[in-house]
Image (cartoon, rainbow, N blue to C red):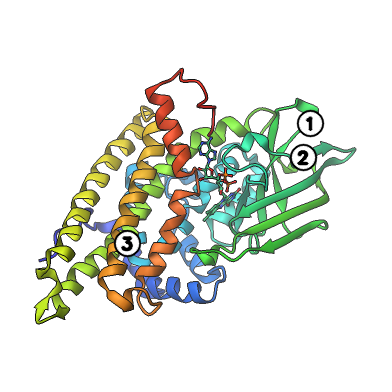
Amino acid sequence: MIPAEVVPPDALEEELHRLDVQIPLEGLSQALDAEPRFPRELFREMGAARLLGLTVPVELGGRGLPVSRAARLLYRLAFLGGTLPAKLALQPEFCSLLVALGDDEQRKGTLEPLMRGETLVGNQITEPSAGSDFRAIQATARRTDSGYRIEGTKSQAAFAADAETAIVLLRVPEEGTRALGSWLVPQELPGVVRRVVGDHGERWMRRGTVEYHSVDVPVSARLGGPGTALSHLRSELSRERALLAAIYLGVARRSWEETVEYVARRESFGVALSERQAVSFPLVEDWVRFESAWRQLEAVLAALETGAASDAATALIKWYSGEVALEALEHCVQFHGGMGYSRELPHERRLRDVRSARVAHGTAEIAHLIGARALWPRAPGQGKAQ
Ligand SMILES: Cc1cc2nc3c(=O)[nH]c(=O)nc-3n(C[C@H](O)[C@H](O)[C@H](O)COP(=O)(O)OP(=O)(O)OC[C@H]3O[C@@H](n4cnc5c(N)ncnc54)[C@H](O)[C@@H]3O)c2cc1C
């Protein structure tokens, strides 16, 4: 018997199922892994169904849901179709600088089309020599007579090839040696050069490098005033990390349920695989870890809603949920034998997709640093990473 799902479906979740019937999500994920491209049609459908920006306020075109409710929906989306539809749904939350700092014109011109799934907006923070430590950013925005001139290179950016606009974090030398600001930069401007790098998983994101060679933008391209970008980024990271945790668990839970069924059917040496403890015990342990990670995540989400969640709690639940998911997915690949290793089945793709959990939105090591800082606030050498 398959154990009950961690999260039972409800009315709003039925909308996700309707979307899945209209555009079979798992099939799309598998197809875009083989031939990566941005899923414009799905993005537009999700915009029309108001499934983009689940926690974004209603007046800005989102659903305005509490973070715990959004996490359940993202879990379902990830269960249905992997990280692809779930991370698409989350994309406006990743554009939190635009949501929080955008003025009326920026909201009308960029946020509203994003919420409708008509315009893809990327985020560009990382640089070749500034990743976990984004205070080391070197790309600059310098004042000119008519606006700002942008110089430098951003790297590893999701949607490098496909975003119409990007939110770009830049150093502002005129405002101080450590000052950072953010700009909305159309990606078709003269001087913007984009290059895709091939990825291990989530290949539809077409991550890559974006070079800015004397790119001129007007004053109105700046998001927020001096000193606002970094504090917003830090506060939003916590919410993003908790929502990502739900996605990792949803993806892995699907493979795990499929594997629980499969090992009961598959026989070797005349006995079902599920009769072998070498196979059944790891799957039982995964079950316990899923339940435990979800319960911990629920507590973190509740704390986020009251403003009581610590940076350590959100960083560590993202890390832990990622590890729980990756370990379960390893078992799913393994217990499907040679077919598990093949691209005929979805498990190895899901494993590659969820592998980004250890790097994106704060690496596993940075999560540990944040945890260590919470345990030993004054410990020397911990730095101030993210
Ligand atoms: C799928 C995916 C999507 C991404 N999307 C975007 C995007 O849209 N926009 C964007 O700007 N970036 C994006 N990134 C980049 C991501 O934010 C960075 O990869 C991440 O911040 C780590 O930076 P880095 O790659 O420079 O690694 P580094 O910071 O160089 O780290 C390398 C290794 O050293 C470890 N390390 C670093 N510092 C410490 C320390 N103080 N103590 C212990 N260990 C340490 C890290 O944990 C890691 O294991 C994406 C990455 C992935 C994988």
Q: Classify mark 1: helix, strand or loop.
A: helix
Q: Classify mark 3: helix, strand or loop.
A: helix
Q: Earlier in the sequence, mark 3 or mark 2?
A: 2
Give the x, y percent position of residue 67: 37, 42
Mark-to-mark CA distance, 3 and 2: 41 Å
Mark 3, residue position: 329
**In terms of depth relative to the viewer, which is nearer, 177 or 101?**
177
Hey, what amino acid is under mark 2? Answer: Thr
Mark 1, residue position: 173
Hey, what amino acid is under mark 1? Answer: Pro
Mark 2, residue position: 140
For marks 1 and 3, give the one nearer the viewer. Answer: 3
State which quarter of the image contains the N terminus: bottom left
Q: Earlier in the sequence, mark 1 or mark 3?
A: 1
In this rendering, position of residue 371 left or right of residue 277: right
Give the x, y percent position of residue 337: 28, 75
Q: Is residue 87 above or below residue 125?
A: below
Q: Classify mark 2: helix, strand or loop.
A: strand
The answer to which image quadrant residue 11 occupies is: bottom left
